[in-house]
């Protein structure tokens, strides 16, 4: 995948906006509220990923790697994304990281949701 303006913007702004939202959002103490906000966040990530990839201004480094792998292996994006997320989850767990329900939900659903988002926001060629 060819880098572009979107690649640079992804690298510069994703962490910045994550930090900004962490300052704005309240700390939730009730589990069902935490879960609801988490699930909303997964959907927002999927929609945002579909939007910025569909712009064709360049994918972020990780998404570009996944798109390139999917194209090279002739496999659907959701499958490759899920494999990458599951691999990262496993490596993190082997290194002593915590794996909870949110980690599993994200790893197992984000690929499918991003692929759905890509279909919805696909920009016609030409």
Image: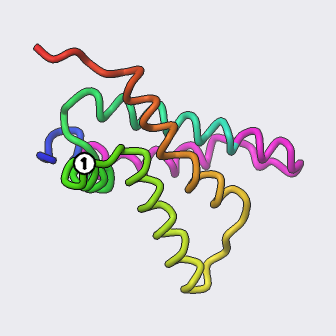
In this image, 53 relative to 95: left or right?
Answer: left
- Relative image position of residue 104 (x, y in whole percent): 64, 59
Q: Which residues are magenta?
A: 8-37
| 95 falls in the magenta region | no
Instruction: Please tell me whether residue 122 is drawn above or below residue 43 in the rendered image.
Output: above
- Relative image position of residue 23 (x, y in whole percent): 61, 47
Assign the magenta stretch its main secondary structure: helix
Determine the image quadrant of residue 33: top right
Farthest-out residue, bottom? 95
**Residue at x-position 54% and y-position 34%:** 44
Dot 1 falls on a residue whose secondary structure is loop
Which residue in the structure is indicated by mark 1? 74
**Residue at x-position 54% and y-position 69%:** 89
Farthest-out residue, right? 30
- Relative image position of residue 53 (x, y in whole percent): 30, 35
In this image, 63 relative to 27: left or right?
Answer: left
The image quadrant where one finds the C terminus is: top left
Give whichever of 94, 71 is nearer the camera.
71
Q: How many marks?
A: 1
In this image, 102 relative to 29: left or right?
Answer: left
Instruction: Please tell me whether residue 13 is drawn above or below residue 40 in the rendered image.
Output: below
Neighbourhood count class around disc 1 (C-alpha, 10 Å): few under 14, some 14–19, many 20 upward: few
- Relative image position of residue 46 (x, y in whole percent): 49, 37
């Amino acid at each position: 995948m060819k880098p572009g303006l979107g690649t640079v913007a992804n690298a510069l702004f994703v962490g910045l906006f994550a930090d900004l939202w962490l300052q704005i959002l309240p700390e939730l103490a009730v589990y069902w509220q935490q879960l609801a906000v988490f699930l909303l966040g997964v959907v927002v990530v999927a929609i945002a990923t579909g939007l910025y990839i569909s712009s064709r201004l360049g994918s972020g480094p990780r998404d570009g790697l996944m798109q390139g792998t999917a194209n090279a292996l002739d496999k659907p994006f959701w499958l490759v994304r899920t494999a990458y997320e599951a691999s990262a989850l496993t490596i993190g767990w082997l290194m002593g990281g915590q794996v909870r329900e949110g980690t599993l939900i994200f790893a197992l659903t984000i690929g499918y949701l991003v692929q759905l988002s890509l279909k919805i926001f696909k920009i016609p060629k030409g």
